[in-house]
Amino acid sequence: MLIDSHAHLNDPVYDADRDDVIRRAGEAGVGAIVTIGCDLESSRRAVELADRYKMIYATIGVHPHEVKLVDDTTLTELQKLAAHKKVIGFGEIGLDYFYLHSPRETQQRRFRQQIAQAKMLGLPIVVHSRDAKSDTLSILKEERVENIGGVMHCFTGDLEMARIAMEMNFYISFAGVLTFTNATAVREVARALPMDRILLETDCPYLSPVPNRGRRNEPAYIRYTAEVLARLHPDQTPESIMNVTAENAARLFKIKI
């Protein structure tokens, strides 16, 4: 079994063939897909999809790109969405200093607010961190997130960052980047981590893995990332990688498999 721990099936790019995408995922051995909220509207769509499809679960939250648009009403509405039985995490939240679509100060304030909300709801957090290692780790430490834990999504950081995150009860998730020719540093981090702390994701429709790089990504392609991870851990087979990463995701998000 496989679990795609981070997908954006709520993206309009799937509107024309979403049923086919979900069918192909099942045929590829994917048993569950976590569909991620990035703002209030996409969070609503994620919950709607989770309500409609047995294999889909949802998270809710506001991405650092979008937090400049957040107000108190947004947080209230997110809390209402969290009442749905298939909402299993809070995110994608965090910091992105690469694009700075929202000011740093706003990103930091809303990151802390959403962590507080996740703690109140008892939900693990899904963290986006790009070019913001120091501030991300500092905020996670200061907000004492170890009781809820979470996942560092689409990880491209260094081994130090991964180890500090794991000490705070975090999993490290790898996407199709792991298969890219120029991603040597990411593969070295994946090689060094214990298997019981690793998740797999597609981040679809983005970051399609080799051999489909450049095409629209979808959950069925997660197998390619699993195969690369197996080569980095010679004591594992692709099948055991699929199983252990699914067990890890199920443990974090409390998904029954």
Image: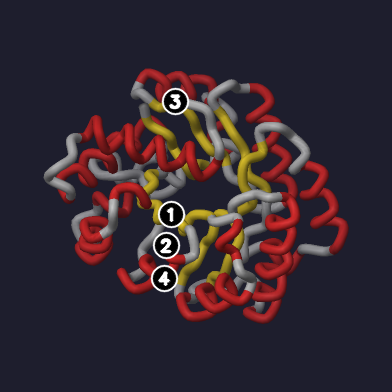
Q: Element type at marker 1?
A: strand
The residue furthest front is: 147
Residue type highlighted by circle 1: Tyr
Mark 1 lies on residue: 171
Q: Secondary structure at mark 3?
A: strand
* Mark 2 and mark 1 residues within 8 Å of each other at the beta carbon: yes
Classed neighbour count for the residue bearing mark 4: other residues with Cα under 10 Å, few (<14), some (14–19), many (≥20): few
The residue singled out by tag 4 in the image is 164
**Sequence-earlier tag: 2 or 1:** 2
State the CA–CA distance, disc 3 to disc 4: 30 Å
How far across and down, in percent of the image, does residue 198 sit?
36, 50
Residue found at x 70% / y 32%: 85
Dot 2, crowdedness within 10 Å: few (<14), some or many (≥20)?
Answer: many
Q: Residue at x 59, y 34 (%)?
A: 57
Q: Amino acid at mark 4?
A: Ile
**Residue that mark 2 sits on:** 166
> Quick one: quadrant of the N terminus?
top left
> Label 3 neighbourhood size at 10 Å, few (<14), some (14-19), many (20+)?
some
Is 236 left or right of 21, judged from the image as shown?
Answer: left
Q: SS of the residue at dot 4?
A: helix
Q: Residues at badges 3 and 4 in contact (C-beta under 8 Å)? A: no
